[in-house]
Amino acid sequence: MPDDGYSVAVRAPSAGPAKEGGATGDDQQRATFPAYAPNVTGLDSVPRRSWLTADAIAAVRDESDRAFDDAEYEQRLTSVRDRMARGGMDAMLAFRPSSVEYLCGYHTAETAPQPLLVTESATYLYVPDLELGRALASARVDNIGYCGYADALRGLETFLEHAAGVLPAGARVGIEVGHASTPPHAVEYLRGSRVTVVRGEHLVETVRLRLSEAEVRCVAEAAERTRAGVDAAVAAAREPEATDSSVAGAISAALFDGANSASAWGPVVATGVRGGIPHSSWSHRRLGPGTTFLEFSGAHHRYHAPVMRTLAHGPPGPDERVLAELAETAVAAVLDTARAGVSCADVANAAAAALGPLPDGVVFHHLFGYPVGLAHKPHWMDGAPFYITRDNPEPLEAGMVFHIPASFRYLGRCGVGLSQTFLVTETGARVLTHGAAQLTVL
């Protein structure tokens, strides 16, 4: 299909797989739309879906919700293809939903595996037929292959057979085999096919570490929602009958109000003793005494800007003051040290030195930062494991965005978490979230 940016082909099922760059099948309906248009091909034996008409496709495509323009997606594909070439890969099959969205814009609430095949010159998105609307509305791909919804839920064989068929025999296909989103039987199936499977761990996710200006704007928009969540939490916590669940409800309402997407995780609201038990959350308990730990993120086009904040119900006690001082110190040290060219280890060492020996009984994870940005459920930690830790010698680069999870606890007694999300620049760290990283006394 000529890449004129206006044609779409809706094709009937064919007897064989497509060749690279287009789908097979003679029966076509063509229509003209003002957007990038894929070939759409049925891969099963069911007759062409009668509801997949030109008018229906036009209506769906009028609801296009891609977050970025064509040039942004082309740059991402170019970067990934460069990495593929350096790794000796002829193609890559991505299953991680956030990386599929990163490369082509596709996103949906459906959780069935829907992989994206990237070759040297084409992209193929594989979806259940029920997801064709979402694919046409959001994806910028050359080809969309589909099969029946129930078939897609039961297995991937139809998709994998087609993906292997568009590649030359023996083609080296990179797959992120170690991530939970990649079905083990998919790797097994491809290893028994005509292609060669090679490990492609974090191939896309490493490219994703450096955010474009447009992506940073999305994180900044997410930070505005996060700010609204913090304000709502404080207001709700001041109510006389406040509970951890009422605070969580207020945060959630604020995060959703005016947003175009939901956070991948949270909110966490852990009050009193539960604040001293990592990853506890709300359970309809009255707030306090002591402190209430909060962690959540706003989202914008599924880009995240998380924060930790802690509310003190009256003057903080000695334990809470110790933990708050540690958290404030860790955040300040990371922000003072981080800039492009400085290694993650150097930042972590500076923060560890600023903390000094931890008081007896204090629980801390010694993770001084992890990358955030585009993420799908179950968590906003949805990228390469490029952490600000003492054992990571790699340098920070301009455009990277990190969350500083400065949470300190006395196990089973109390907890304090304070944090910021920041952008790495050539001259230092630019905080994207709002408000001071310090205890909020109610």
Image (cartoon, rainbow, N blue to C red):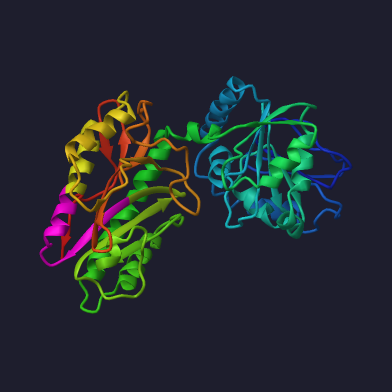
Q: Give the position of the N terminus as an image quadrant.
A: top right
Q: Give the position of the C terminus as an image quadrant.
A: bottom left
The structure residue drawn at horizontal position 74% and vertical position 36%, both measured from the top left corner, is: 191
Residue 39 visible in the displayed image: no
Across and down, in percent, residue 370 comes to 37, 41
Quarter of the figure with residue 82: top right
- Seen in the image, is 342 located left or right of residue 313? right
Magenta part of the protein: which range?
307-325
Q: Is residue 365 magenta?
A: no
The structure residue drawn at horizontal position 30% and vertical position 69%, both measured from the top left corner, is: 247
Q: Residue lying farthest bottom?
A: 241
Q: Nearer the viewer, residue 73 or 283?
A: 283
Q: Residue lying farthest right?
A: 15
Q: Nearer the viewer, residue 386 or 430?
A: 386
Residue 129 vertical position relative to residue 442 in the rendered view, above or below = above
The number of callouts visible is 0
Q: Nearer the viewer, residue 163 or 322?
A: 322
The structure residue drawn at horizontal position 31% and vertical position 30%, both measured from the top left corner, is: 345
The structure residue drawn at horizontal position 23% and vertical position 36%, both measured from the top left corner, is: 351
